Image: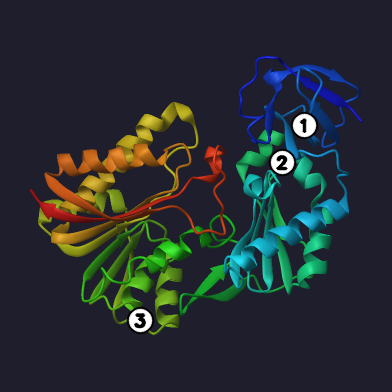
Amino acid sequence: MTKLFLKKKIAARIANGHPWVFGNEVDKIDGPIEPAGTVDVHYADGKFAGRGYINPKSQILVRLLTRKPETIDAAFFHRRIAEAWAYRQKIGYTENCRLVFGEADQMPALIIDKFNDYFVLQTLSLGMDHWKPAIIEALNTIFSPKGIYERNDVPVRELEGLSQIKGFLSEPFDTNIIINENGLRFHVDIENGQKTGYFLDQQDNRKAIQHIVKGADVLGAFTYTGTFEIHAAHYGAKSVLGLDISENAVAQANKNAALNGLDDICKFEAMNAFDVLKQWGKDGRQYDVVMLDPPAFTKSRESIQKAITGYKEINLRGMKLIRNGGFLVTSSCTNLVQPELFLQTIEMAAKDARKKIRQVTFQAQASDHPIIWGMDNTNYLKFLIVEVTDK
């Protein structure tokens, strides 16, 4: 097997368990390089570091699959997926869950979401794409699913020399399905919805609003298909208005409200939340709870400051719309904005809005998206509820 030897001076990251090996960390390669092929990685002193797949076209030259000299084959992937499923069952995620969360499940660049009997797959690197047939075989053997669909229509694949594609990996099926979450039902558009069709990572956080929304007038911005807002109505809100710039998202959100018999309380409108929050603040509109769940503001380190400015601005505008003693529910899924920086940004927004805030809860994504200490990309979602009062 081809062997890669790391330079003497490398980041402690690899020794501490991170699976990525960048090209500039490799001293020499002993043997032929076959793109997507399996290689052994050794430290400069010759000690075995791990085994993984290689892609000379990628900045991440090797992604380690194991720290043991074990065979990487179809049986390996079957075992790993079975282990991932056993873990979800242990922690109580069975009906809908992120079955495989890439590096956190020792399967770098693989995402599998389970929507009851349907599975959505993303193979985001050349090496993982190479093993797609083995992954599909494992899913069929372990679950006997009603359908498998790939959502590989993501730009990050192009960095690996792969094309963007989506389509059936099983017999075709109706990709508009209905799932259950926290006693509610939601339409999921597997084929055309964002990411894999639904944001499972917020499923626990949606439960966290149940006490603060009772009898409240609630405003939700960047609502997508209305899951937070519909939970608010379900938990006893007096009125709920959700805003999203996408006409399609708003249509689906209204459909979801009707599906749950909450369309008399819960309304959605297609509007640019940035503009609306600013204008309504000037107009003196007031709500008991304002919920903000924007998309990621940056995917590059170069524009982190721009993302921070954006988060500060929308949270400042949100706070200005909250009645004294009301609540702000706010999220950030920007991986590069670490939790401490996010909290600092909210604090700056409160100062500029001349508001006092008191933390109710601060948490990450649902536990079916496990966080591995030392792997920042696994700790990406920040979810915060604060009480907002006048100074």
- Three-letter amino acid code of the residue under disc 1: Asn
Residue 205 image point, x, y percent: 41, 62
Of residues 236 and 286, the one nearer the viewer is 236
Task: Specify the quadrant of the image occupied by residue 94.
Answer: bottom right
Task: Specify the quadrant of the image occupied by residue 326.
Answer: bottom left
Residue 191 image point, x, y percent: 62, 63
Of residues 136 and 152, the one nearer the viewer is 136
Graded by Cα atoms within 10 Å as few (under 14), some (14 to 19) or many (20 or more), the crowding at tag 2 reads many
Q: Quick check: can you spot residue 161? A: no
Secondary structure beneath dot 1 equals loop
Residue labelled with disc 2: 125
Q: Quick check: can you spot residue 306? A: yes
Q: CA distance from mark 2 to mark 3?
A: 42 Å
Residue at the spot 62% in from the left edge and 40% down from the top edge: 156
Mark 1 or mark 2: which comes first in sequence? 1
- Three-letter amino acid code of the residue under disc 2: Ser
- Residue 262 is tagged as 3
- Residue depth check, mark 3 versus mark 1: number of the one nearer the observer: 1
Residue 290 image point, x, y percent: 25, 60
Residue labelled with disc 1: 55
Task: Give the farthest residue toward the bottom.
Answer: 261
Residue 72 image point, x, y percent: 86, 45
- Three-letter amino acid code of the residue under disc 3: Leu
Q: CA distance from mark 1 to mark 2?
A: 8 Å
Secondary structure beneath dot 2 equals loop
